[in-house]
Amino acid sequence: MRAIEITHYGKPEVLQICERDIPRPGAGEILIKVHAAGINRPDVLQRMGHYPVPPGASDIPGLEVAGEIVNGDFTGSDFSVGDMVCALVQGGGYAEYCIAPIRQCLPIPAGLSAIEAASLPETCFTVWSNVFDRAKLTSGEALLVQGGSSGIGVTAIQIAVALGHRVFATAGSAEKCRAIEVLGAERGINYKTEDFAEVIKELTAGKGVDVILDMVAGNYIPLEISCLADDGRLAIIALLGGAHSDVDFSQILRRRLTVTGSTLRPRSVEFKAAIAAQLKSHVWPLYVSKKIKPVIHQVFPLERADQAHVLMEASQHVGKIVLEINR
């Protein structure tokens, strides 16, 4: 099969097309003929040597795929050969065939293409796990999404709005702010020209938001703490702004705040299977009814994976970047 390998750590050009053996599924796994694979920020970090591959995972990058089931172990599932699915994987997505734990697979929502479906797993699993399970966003509460124009951002905005929450989001240009407002954000905040903490306080009459989904960290954390409502929760999913910050812990104590974080890739199949079940019940119907939609910025062929990474690093996109592999 054709695949993309990281020949050595470095810039996007280290991503090269290669020939690999088709992997063989084990117990509880299926083999997918990949039609499309999503591009995610962790893929870039892996390429640069900053995101180690978990033990036993493929060294081929790619954390989400959509395609046709070819064979595998279907024990305890409703899937069979020929079904079209999308899946969260630990690696191996940038290839013509990929192994996936069957419990981390979901049917492609009715009406969506494989390219659209390939943009869903990593973002949906991450958003549900962190915003709704970990930070426990509940009825009547408000959410701030940092990086609202990213794949994670557009997913978090749409799901939260569809479930009835006030949502605010940051982005790095006026155009991106307009785009995320079209997707449902009450206010897009340009973090380059505005103080997001002050804007949030103004928009919420001084109360603040109940949950913040943060992929920046660093010097954002004190500002985020200042614009959390009492009993608010800050969920950190990435450290694009750095791993260190000065924090006023008296606010955390006095206002009963929670600061938490997580990474998804090393978690167990059992953990991810539980998220998959929640997505199938609560989020997949929103895609079927078109209350929310995949947001695809650009599609590249497999052999142009390097150019897809160039675009990802430039941060000029709104939504997801996808590789088309088998048509």
Image: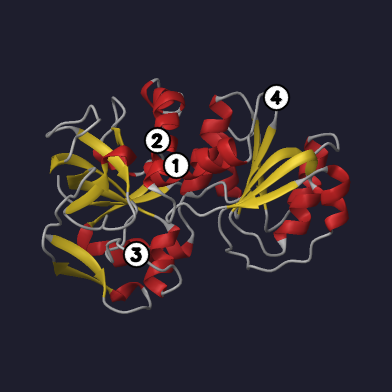
> Which mark sits nearer the N-terminus, 2 or 4?
4
- Which secondary structure, mark 3? loop
Horizontal relation, residue 147 to residue 47: left or right: right
The residue that mark 2 highlights is 276
Type of amino acid at the residue the image marks with label 4: Gly
In space, the residues marked 1 and 2 are separated at their CA atoms by 7 Å
Q: Nearer the viewer, mark 1 or mark 2?
A: 2
Q: Quadrant of the N terminus?
A: bottom left
Q: Residues within 10 Å of mark 4 (few under 14, many from 20)?
A: few
Q: Nearer the viewer, mark 4 or mark 1?
A: 1
The residue that mark 4 highlights is 140
Q: Quadrant of the C terminus?
A: top left
Q: Nearer the viewer, mark 2 or mark 3?
A: 3
The residue that mark 3 highlights is 55
| The quarter of the displayed image where residue 221 is located | bottom right
In space, the residues marked 4 and 1 are separated at their CA atoms by 23 Å
Q: Residues within 10 Å of mark 2 (few under 14, many from 20)?
A: many
Type of amino acid at the residue the image marks with label 2: Ala
Q: Residues within 10 Å of mark 3 (few under 14, many from 20)?
A: few
Horizontal relation, residue 100 to residue 159: left or right: left
In space, the residues marked 1 and 3 are separated at their CA atoms by 21 Å
Type of amino acid at the residue the image marks with label 3: Pro
| The quarter of the displayed image where residue 40 is located | bottom left
Q: Residue at x 71, y 59 (%)?
A: 220
In space, the residues marked 3 and 4 are separated at their CA atoms by 41 Å
